[in-house]
Amino acid sequence: MNQEEKKQRAYEFYVLSSVKRTRKEIAKLAQVTEKTLREWIDKYDWDKLREARQITRPQLLQEAYAQLKAINQVIQTEHNNVPNKELSDAKAVIRKEIEAFSSQPIHRYIEVFEEFIEWLSKNEPVQLNTFGTLSQRFIQELSKQK
């Protein structure tokens, strides 16, 4: 296995796998040192990608809407439907969060790529490695822009 294949394998275990493994275990599975794995994690922002993958857009939107609902209930019950400055500011912040979650966040791309990779593995397995590498590069570039 060449270095690029080892890096791809480490990426899959570290970022894409739903099985929680230690860095030591991942390094062993990818046949690299822990130092090399740490360098890749830092250089390619794998922690950020891993985190983005674990937090889904629907989950974030649901939490934001629940917070907005709670603020509206406080306004209705404790302030006779007239928010004070603090509550108005809180609503504005949550509305901005909702707008941000509704745009094109990185985890949305990751979700689509994961679905496509799953389809590709069943229908065109020969293309899987190439697409996996390209999609990884695309996501990394996006994460640097945002």
Image (spheres, rainbow, N blue to C red):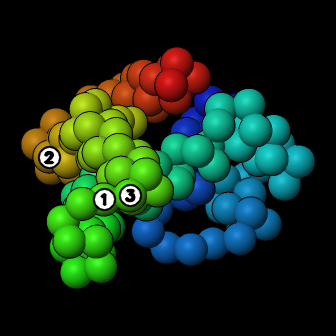
Where, by quadrant of the figure, is residue 63 drawn?
bottom left
Q: Residues within 10 Å of mark 3 (few under 14, many from 20)?
A: few
Q: Residue at x 67, y 62 (%)?
A: 26
Q: Residues within 10 Å of mark 2 (few under 14, many from 20)?
A: few
Q: Nearer the viewer, mark 2 or mark 3?
A: 3
Q: Residue at x 63, y 72 (%)?
A: 21
In the rendered image, the quadrant that contains the N terminus is: top right
Residue 68 image position (x, y, % from top left): 27, 62
Name the residue carrying label 1.
83
Q: Is residue 59 visible?
A: no
- Name the element at disc 3: loop
Q: Nearer the viewer, mark 2 or mark 1?
A: 1
- Name the element at disc 1: loop
105 up-or-down from 67: above or below? above
Residue 5 image position (x, y, % from top left): 58, 36
Residues under labels 1 and 3: Cα distance?
A: 4 Å
15 up-or-down from 24: above or below? above
Mark 3 belongs to which amino acid? Asn
Name the residue carrying label 2.
119
Residue 113 image position (x, y, % from top left): 27, 39
Name the residue carrying label 3.
84
